[in-house]
Amino acid sequence: MTDLTTRSATTRHETGEGIQRSGTGDPGGKGRTTIADGVVAKIAAASAREVPGIHGLGTGMARALGSVRDRVPAGRPGQTRGVSVEVGERQTAVDLDVVVEYGYPIRDVVADLRVAVVTAVERMTGLEVVEVNVAVGDVRLPDEPDEEPQDGPRVT
């Protein structure tokens, strides 16, 4: 988890115009905010899934075990499968294991993935993302069955 301590704002000058803030009366400058690792992981996972060319998160055994766990009645879907984060006081690092759709240029997909994750995490948490490491563990071919469980009953 991270601890973000908000300091009273200071006076800042940009291009000759003064922007002044006072620490008094600013309710946003009082108290501490804590952001859990899981929050950053969920944000990173959600933004990664929106990138064209990303089939899924997690590879190999993690996806197989996650698929089984998702089918257990009390189990929750693995929203952060394939994502690990390290969160500090002001910075975070993200590691992603991904499966790319066949036909997409992997370098372009990974570049778009990094931009999407950095943008979402920094915008939503205020933490600086210092790195996004991506491991492409598989390519999903068009004729391969989908490993992800479908919503709804398994039997009819």
Image (tube, rainbow, N blue to C red):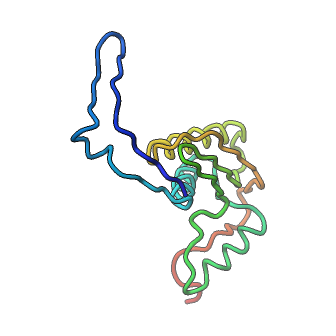
83 left or right of 156? right
Q: Please, which residue is most extreme toward the top here?
A: 16
Q: Please, which residue is most extreme toward the left here?
A: 25
Q: Is residue 149 above or below residue 129?
A: below
Q: How many marks?
A: 0
26 left or right of 89? left
Q: Is residue 25 above or below residue 59?
A: above
Quadrant where the C terminus is found in the figure: bottom right
Q: Is residue 149 above or below residue 36?
A: below
Depth order, front residue of 131/155: 131
Q: x, y percentage for residue 144?
A: 73, 63
Depth order, front residue of 124/66: 124
Identify the residue shown where x is 70% and y is 51%: 100
128 left or right of 126? right
Identify the residue shown where x is 55% and y is 58%: 1
Depth order, front residue of 94/92: 92
Depth order, front residue of 126/52: 126
Q: Quadrant of residue 84?
A: bottom right
Q: x, y percentage for residue 104?
A: 69, 43
Identify the residue shown where x is 64% and y is 64%: 81
Q: Please, which residue is most extreme toward the front here?
A: 24
Identify the residue shown where x is 21% and y is 41%: 25
Q: x, y percentage for residue 28?
A: 30, 45
Q: Please, which residue is most extreme toward the bottom here?
A: 156
